[in-house]
Amino acid sequence: AMVSNNLLRVLLVSIMRGSLLSIPFYTSLAGVALSTAVVIIINALLKPSVLMLSVVSSIFHPLGQIFVISRIYNLNQVYVLLPPLLILSVITGVLTGIISTKTLDRLNRNNNY
């Protein structure tokens, strides 16, 4: 379900923006594909928390994007963007993980009554 949701999201956003099969579509697809694959692998191996999965996903998404951009444009200098992107990814991953954990806790608490 997670894989199909992610792929549908990329597809629908690309259609709405008119960027289907363009460079933004492929970079988005690469980010989603890599982050989803890594999350599935880590989830199967470690049974991690929602917070950890959120951080891992947010780290691997820009890695996939940067890799595709570097291959499309044959430009390795784009990797200089990774340090600030990864710092921001960890911050947003932690924030998303905290919000997701709190939301899931509230949903579980409400379902128990």
Image: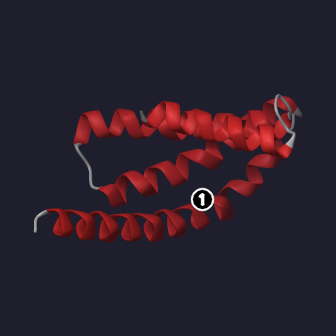
| Residue 76 image position (x, y, % from top left) | 81, 40
Quadrant in the rendering for residue 74: top right
Residue at x 84% of width, y 36% of height: 23
Residue at x 26% of width, y 65% of height: 107
With 40 as the anchor, is 48 left or right in this view?
A: left
Quadrant in the rendering for residue 54: bottom left
For the N terminus, the image quarter is top left
For the C terminus, the image quarter is bottom left
Quadrant in the rendering for residue 85: bottom right
**Which is more toward the observer, 93 or 109?**
109
| Residue 86 image position (x, y, % from top left) | 59, 59
Q: Name the residue under label 1.
A: 86
| Residue 25 image position (x, y, % from top left) | 77, 36
- Residue type indicated by callout 1: Leu
Circle 1 SS class: helix
With 25 as the anchor, is 22 left or right in this view?
A: right
Total numbered labels placed on residues in the image = 1
